[in-house]
């Protein structure tokens, strides 16, 4: 006799992280039909569908364990079908460490529902109370040891293209025999070990190009100049950013900056100085307004700084990514220092 489940009054749709009380777990929200997750149309085989894909993180092996544990079938009887747009659930994307939470949670609930459904059919056919029926390796028996059939015989003619009710309870953790204990062969390991092109990040399209981000480097380390620091350095006002360190052979060092100088302007602007030094393209020339001080130096923190203040100089720096810069020249003219570099 065909057996169907009763659909809920209103099944929630779509993906969400906040799963309120009574809501279907995981990706069952947007994919509530049992047939989207499980099939018993091949004797001795549980076909499992998931919207998640194997990226080398072992997700298909983990989902295989969840299904085998919840249904009480052999691990080898569980066959995973990953990201089948024709048959399986739409779970959006595989990212953010959500596969166990969303796909695993959905499969565990769907398996609990199928287990309860098969138990109910076995109870009706054998005139046995459901609580007296147990399942082992996919076969159902009563407390007297009578064989009541397996999933494939009990679910023949049962319509699984119905919404999950969420009524059945998955096994408590103490009743699980496989999860955390069994060690099945991970389906992703052989291809990783032997370097086979199996995963999405191994895809190589014709004419595929790769790029990287390159940023200009002036090689100057700055610290915001607050009122307390300006007072300690005997500066006329708390304005600018203190040069605490210079990278060796950097554009800033070749332009004449020294630890203890105060940068007061960057390309004519006097705000957000620390951030502005990283905003220029490679080989761009920038003008830096600097208040340079006399050579009476003392140790301040890790940087050598100067007391007293002189006028403001304009330093011209060319920022390069390359750490070694050859063929540069430095020339001084009055209170302006210019440096040009070529990689």
Image (spheres, rainbow, N blue to C red):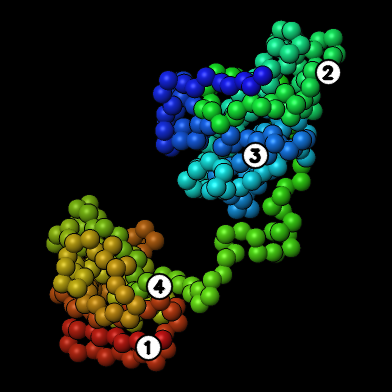
Residue 79 position (above or below residue 320): above
Q: Which mark is residue 147?
A: 2
Dot 1 or dot 3: first in sequence order is 3
The reply, left or right, for residue 118 in relation to residue 5 is right
Residue depicted at x 83% and y 18%: 147
Q: Please provide percent x and percent y for residue 143.
A: 81, 10
The answer to whether any part of residue 7 appears in the image is yes
Q: Name the residue tied to disc 3.
A: 48
Could you give the CA–CA distance between mark 1 and mark 3, rounded to whole angstroms?
A: 61 Å
Position of residue 58 in the picture relative to residue 227 (left or right):
right
Q: Residue furthest right?
A: 145
Q: Is residue 142 left or right of residue 269?
A: right
Marks 4,2: beta carbons within 8 A: no
At a point 85% along the width and 13% down the height, the residue shown is: 145
Binning the other alpha carbons within 10 Å of mark 4 as few (below 14), some (14 to 19) or many (20 upward) gives: few
> Measuring 78% from the left and 35% from the top, which residue is drawn there?
44
Question: Looking at the figure, which quarter contains the C terminus?
Answer: bottom left
Foreground pick, 249 / 103: 103
> Which mark is nearer the camera, 1 or 3?
3
Q: Are marks 4 and 1 in contact (CB under 8 Å)?
A: no
Circle 1 or circle 2, nearest the eye: 2
């Amino acid at each position: 006799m065909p057996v169907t489940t009763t659909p809920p009054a209103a099944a929630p749709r779509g993906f969400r992280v906040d799963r309120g009380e009574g809501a279907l777990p995981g990706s069952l929200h947007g994919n509530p039909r049992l047939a989207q997750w499980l099939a018993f149309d091949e004797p001795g085989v549980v076909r499992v569908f998931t919207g998640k894909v194997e990226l080398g993180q072992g997700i298909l092996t983990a989902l295989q364990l969840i299904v085998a544990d919840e249904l009480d079938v052999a691990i080898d009887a569980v066959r995973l079908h990953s990201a089948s747009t024709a048959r399986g659930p739409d779970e959006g994307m595989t990212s953010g460490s959500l596969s166990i939470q969303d796909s695993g949670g959905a499969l565990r609930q769907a398996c609990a529902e199928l287990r309860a459904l098969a138990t109910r059919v076995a109870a009706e056919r054998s005139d046995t109370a459901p609580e007296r029926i147990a399942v082992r390796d996919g076969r159902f028996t009563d407390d007297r040891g009578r064989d009541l059939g397996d999933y494939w015989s009990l679910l023949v003619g049962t319509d699984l293209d119905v919404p999950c009710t969420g009524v059945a309870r998955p096994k408590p953790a103490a009743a699980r025999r496989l999860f955390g204990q069994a060690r099945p062969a991970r389906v992703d390991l052989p291809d990783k070990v032997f370097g086979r092109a199996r995963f999405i990040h191994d895809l190589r399209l014709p004419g595929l190009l790769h790029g990287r981000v390159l940023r200009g480097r002036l090689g100057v380390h700055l610290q915001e100049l607050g009122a307390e620091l300006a007072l300690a350095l005997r500066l006329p006002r708390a304005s600018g950013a203190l040069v605490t360190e210079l990278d060796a052979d950097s554009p800033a060092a070749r332009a004449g900056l020294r630890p203890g100088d105060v940068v007061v302007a960057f390309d004519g602007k006097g705000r957000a100085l620390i951030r502005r030094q990283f905003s220029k393209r490679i080989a761009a020339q920038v003008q830096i307004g600097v208040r340079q001080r006399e050579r009476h130096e003392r140790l301040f923190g890790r940087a050598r700084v100067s007391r007293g203040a002189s006028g403001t100089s304009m330093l011209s720096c060319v920022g390069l990514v390359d750490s070694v810069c050859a063929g540069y020249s430095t020339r001084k003219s009055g209170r302006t220092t210019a440096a040009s570099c070529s990689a």
